[in-house]
Amino acid sequence: MFIKFNFIIKKNKQTVMETTQKVKIDAAIRFEEPIHCTQYLVDGELKIWEGGTSDVFSTIYTENSKGKVGPTLLGSIPDMETDAALDALNAAEKAFNRGQGAWPTMKVKDRLKCLEVFAKKMQEHREEVVELLMWEIAKNKADSYKEFDRTVDYIYDTIEAYKKLDRKSAKFDKQAGIHAHIRRGPLGVVLCLGPYNYPLNETFCLLIPAIIMGNTAIFKPAKHGVLLITPLLKAFHESFPPGVVNIVFGRGRKIASPIMQTGKIDVLALIGHSSSAVALQDLHPNKNRLRLVLGLEAKNPGIILPDADLDLTIKECISGTLSYNGQRCTALKMLFVHESIVDEFNARFTKAVDALKFGLPWEEGVFLTPLPEPSKPAYIQDLIKDAKAKGAKVLNKKGGQLSHNYSYPAVLYPVTSEMDVYHEEQFGPVVPVMSYKDINEPLDVMAASDYGQQVSLFGRDIRKIGPLVDVLANLVCRVNLNSACQRGPDVYPFTGRKNSAVSTLSVFDALRSFSIRTFVAAKDNSYNNEILDALMDTKDSNFVNTEYLL
C-alpha cells in the first residue's frame, strides 16, 4: 500500500497542497482490509445487524487498487434504528430489575472479578486497538499506546479504589442509639456517550466506574474512533452477565434521543459539548430524577507573568496548546502574556511551533498529525480569516498552511474580544495570544467566561503567585503551576465550573458520581441485634456484611 504524502507550495499568495509523492507504508501498520462490523452487544448476546450501515473513513489519504487517491475506507458500522436502541435499554433495565438484578445485588468481590477478566481480555487486543487509534483519529503512535495502557491502568486502579471504599464500609456505626451499616449503592441504568478525541480512555472513565458500582449501561461509541471498539465486543460479551453492558452503534438522534425520551435513564454520562448534554436532558421527562456526569468544553487560559522562565514556559505551552493538535478539552486555548515580555515570547514560541514535525501517526518523532474531522481544517481557516480581518496577524511562517486534512498551527496576535477565536473553544491547531498590562485583565476574562475547568500559571514570585492562586482556585477547578493543563494523573479530581463539567471524574470520585450512599438502620435493642448478628453469620445478605476485601 502507498500513501500520497503532500508537500506545500505557494500559489497566488495562497498556501495550497498541490504536489504529492508516494510513500510506502510499513507492513506493520498497513491497513490491509476494511473492517465491516456487523455485530452489536445486547442482553449478553452478540447479535448480527442486518440493516443499514455507515462507512468509516480515515482522513489519511491512500491510493486504492484502482489508483484513485482519497480518504481511506476503514470499514463500516451498523447504522442502528430506534427499535434496536430500545432493545438495548430494555436489556439494561431488565438486568438492573429495579435493583433486584444479579448485577446490582452481587457481592462486590464478584463484580470486581468480572472487571479483572475484562481487563485481561482487553490487553489481548492492544495492537489492534492502537492501530485503529492511529488510522481512525490520527493519534500518533506514542499517544495511542499511552491511551490504551492508561485505560488498562485505570481499570485496575478503579478496582483497587473500590476495594478501599468497600473496606471502609465493612463496619457498623452507632449514633444516638441507632446502628447503621452504610455503603454506596447503584443508581440504575446509565446512558454512556464518549468523545472522539479519547474514544477509549475517556469513554472507559465513564463506563467502568458506572458498571463497577452495580449500575447497568448502554454505551454508544463516538462518531470518530468507533471501529476500535469492535475488537473489544467479544471481551465485553465474555466478561459480564447479560444486560450489564450493551453496546450499540449509530447516530445520536436515532439511538440516544429515543432512549432519553422514555424517562428510564437514571444517569446521563457524557463527555462532549454542553449543547449535546442540554439537548439530551431536555428529552428526559423527569429531569429532577436524572443524575448527570458530564465532561464538557473548556477555554483554559495560560497566564504568563513577567518573571516566567521562558524556556520552561514555551515548552509547556507547546504541549498545552498543540498536543494532539489541540483537540483536548484540557488544551490551553488562550495565552495571556504580560506586555513586558510578549514580543520575546511570541518570537520564541512561534519558532518552536514551526519546528514541530507534521506527518503520519506512525512516523517516529511526529507531533502534529492529520485532523480526524473532515470539516475541521475549513473551520480553523475560518477562525484565522476572521481574526485577521479584525486586526490579528499570523505570527509564524507556517501558520495556516492548508492541506486536505490539516491546517498547520497558526499563532494569532493580538487577539481581541471581537474575534470568534476569543469566544469559541477552537479544539484544534490555532493559538490565540493576548497581551495584558494589569493581572486583572485575564482574571476578568476568566470570570466572564462560560467555562471554568483549568488554568496554567507561569511565574516565580511567590508574593504574586500566592494571591493569584487564591483567586484562580475560585474560578477554575485546577491551577497548574508552571505546567500545562492536563487530565491526569487519574487519581486527581477532574471536573469544572459553569459549562465545563457536572460531577467529578477520577479514580475515586467517579465511584461516588455513579452511586449513592445508602444504609440499613436498626435501633439498638436485643431484638434487632439478634437479627443483625444472624444476617452476618448466615451471609443471606450481600449488602449487610463486614467481609474485608484484600
Image: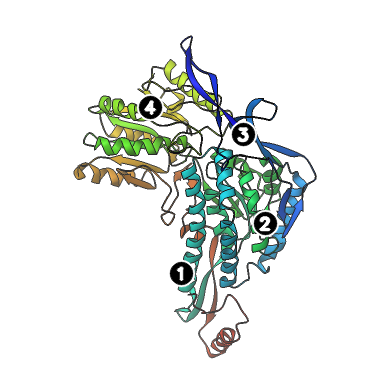
Q: Which mark is residue 101?
A: none
- Mark 1 residue type: Lys
Camera-side mark, 3 or 4: 3
Q: Which residue is more in the foreground, 338 or 483?
A: 483
Badge 1 local density, few (<14 within 10 Å), some, or many (20+)?
some
First in sequence: mark 3 vs mark 1: 3
| Sequence-first tag of 4 and 1 | 1
User: From mark 3 to mark 4, how far is it between C-alphas?
Assistant: 30 Å
Q: Which numbered disc, 2 or 3, marks the residue that appears first in the sequence?
A: 3
Q: What's the residue type where badge 4 is placed?
A: Asp
Placement of 462 over or under 124, stated as above or below: above
Q: Is residue 422 above or below residue 219?
A: above
Q: Which mark is residue 354?
A: 4
Q: Real-space Cα distance between discs 2 and 3?
A: 30 Å
Is 114 rendered above or below residue 85?
A: below
Residue at mark 1: 164
Which residue matches tag 3? Answer: 1
Q: Earlier in the sequence, mark 3 or mark 4?
A: 3
**Between 32 and 106, the one nearer to me in the picture:** 32
